[in-house]
Amino acid sequence: MLPESLRSLPYLVHTNRELGLMLMGTKPLAMFSYTDGYEADCVLRYLRMFDRHAAAGRFTKHEKVSPLQQLNGALHHQVFYTLPMRIGA
């Protein structure tokens, strides 16, 4: 449960709730980013959870990978999960 200070905001706070909100259909997009060699454990954990749902067809996964010159070409990943498009809904 969110504290009152966050529940009273005029927008939906989604931090640490992306997966649940997407499974309910409330949030249409989640985005995570990381750089090879600099991954945070929590991001990798989220990616595994979201990947399971993408593999099951509940989400669509898109990934953009680009080299970072500042880190000697280390690859930076932007991973997007979207709800599947519903035609005629």
Image: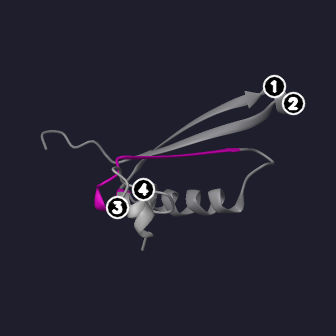
| Mark 2 closeness class: few <14, some 14–19, many ≥20 residues within 10 Å | few
User: Mark 1 — residue?
Assistant: 69
Q: Locate residue 44, reporting x and y percent.
A: 65, 58
- Helix, strand or loop under label 2: loop
Left/right placement of residue 86 relative to residue 32 reads left
How many angstroms separate mark 4 from mark 1 (CA)?
Answer: 34 Å
- Helix, strand or loop under label 1: helix
Mark 3 and mark 2 residues within 8 Å of each other at the beta carbon = no
How many angstroms separate mark 2 from mark 4 (CA)?
Answer: 36 Å
Above or below 34: residue 5: below
Q: Locate residue 54, reporting x and y percent.
A: 44, 54
- Which label belongs to residue 48? none
Residue 4 is inside the magenta segment: no
- Dot 4 or dot 1: first in sequence order is 4
Q: Residue at x 74, y 36 (%)?
A: 75
Q: Which residues are magenta?
A: 22-34
Mark 2 and mark 4 residues within 8 Å of each other at the beta carbon = no
How many angstroms separate mark 3 from mark 1 (CA)?
Answer: 37 Å
- Helix, strand or loop under label 3: helix
User: Mark 2 — residue?
Assistant: 72
User: Mark 4 — residue?
Assistant: 13
Residue type of the residue flagged with mark 4:
Val
How many angstroms separate mark 2 from mark 1 (CA)?
Answer: 5 Å
User: Mark 3 — residue?
Assistant: 23
Residue type of the residue flagged with mark 2:
Asn
Image quadrant occupied by the N terminus: bottom left
- Dot 3 or dot 1: first in sequence order is 3
Left/right placement of residue 48 relative to residue 21 reads right
Badge nearest the viewer, 4 or 1: 4
